[in-house]
Amino acid sequence: MSALYKKPNSPYWCWRERYNGRRFSKSTKMTNKAMAKKIAQQWDMFLMLGDLSFLGLSSNSNQYIKSYVVEYLKFLSNRIESDKTLRTTRGMLNRFVDYMEHNKIERLSEISVKNIDQYLDSLDVAPKTKKNHLQSISLMMKQSVKEDILKSNPCDLATLPKMTKDEKVHRPLQPIDLETIFDGAGSWYMFYAFLYHTGLRSGDVASLKYGNIDFKKKSIVSFIRKSRRIHEFPIADVLLNMLDRNADDDTPIFPTLYTDKEQNDRTVRPRVYMQSLLKAKGRDHADLHSFRHTFNQSLLDLGMDIGDRQKLLAHASSTTTKIYTHPNFDLAMQYVNRIAVYGKSYGNQYSSSIAI
């Protein structure tokens, strides 16, 4: 049964009712309760008939995001020839679904502009990649508008962080930045160290298990999500000395960050914490991807040529279709063990390993 009520400091009566588990409310724009009651009765009748147009919604607006993504991907599969494009779109949309479900948003009609902005902010990727995510989501939303599921596309008003020539979100971290981060890292020390000493993307580091580590060969075998390739490369001694050699292969190296899903919102916590450390010291903005650029810059400073650096960083290349990639192993091992180690806490947490 619907109810009428007044908001504080408002002369108008408002209508409120629940429908399919959701609560709806709308102002009648009437100050006279008898008139407001007649309007409310009319709206009650609309709800009984499943007509939500008076709320600015379609009768199909209860569509679940997850189920619609499945339908939309089937729709796309008949219109996109490139398997790679379809696979990339599927990965982006599934990541979006995971984020929305994590935040208790299940239906298309519940997605707001704010939700889109917050999702984009949660992505630890380059601005260009964020733009690709927004485009994929927007095209899906646009299709839902065509199908009369939504009245408007919330992505139309979403905003991406603007990049200026002077702004370097993924800038290489300077020694003072690294000292600040590692001295204050606390429980995130090992995660930051893996980012800094491997050059892997944060999602790839978070998904590592002990089975990815070959202690005898001193290497990491990792599935690189962006390029969809398996990459083997040497692991620095400083990282090996942090690891539990008796752990089972299926044990995640970072249990609080691990997920087998494409979407990993858990890396938001170490990113925000790192940024708070830098901000407290008055340092420029940076994010977790900055560690990858710092790794690359460190190798450059040590004299490693661009070709070997590209292989070590597992850069995707349009000229190669290799599924399994690895750098010049002996050469790479020499370089990764020459990268500087930072952090006062290292000696306390990992006293059995290298002295700083």
Image: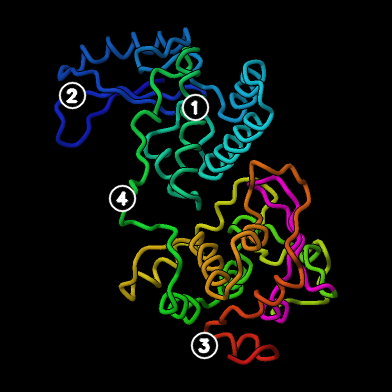
Q: CA distance from mark 1 to mark 2?
A: 30 Å
* Nearer-N-terminus badge (2/4): 2
Pointers 2 and 3 in contact (C-beta within 8 Å): no
Task: Give above or below for 279 relative to 182.
Answer: above
Pointers 1 and 4 in contact (C-beta within 8 Å): no
**Which residue is nearer to you in this view: 67 or 20?**
67
| Quadrant of image for the C terminus | bottom right
For the point 85% across and 75% down, which residue is it? 216
Task: Look at mark 3 in the image and give the residue it sits on.
Answer: 344
Asked if residue 342 lies left or right of residue 173, the reply is right
User: Which numbered disc, 1 or 2, marks the residue closer to the eye?
Assistant: 1
For the point 30% across and 73% down, which residue is it? 282
**Which residue is nearer to you in this view: 272 or 5?**
272
Task: Look at mark 2 in the image and give the residue it sits on.
Answer: 12
For the point 42% across and 28% down, which residue is it? 23
* Nearer-N-terminus badge (3/1): 1
Q: CA distance from mark 4 to mark 3?
A: 35 Å
User: Which numbered disc, 4 or 3, marks the residue closer to the eye?
Assistant: 4
Residue 38 location (% of width, % of height): 27, 9
Task: Look at mark 4 in the image and give the residue it sits on.
Answer: 164
Identified by mark 2, the residue type is: Tyr
* Nearer-N-terminus badge (4/3): 4
Task: Look at mark 1 in the image and give the residue it sits on.
Answer: 108
Q: CA distance from mark 1 to mark 4?
A: 33 Å
Disc 4 is placed on an element classified as loop
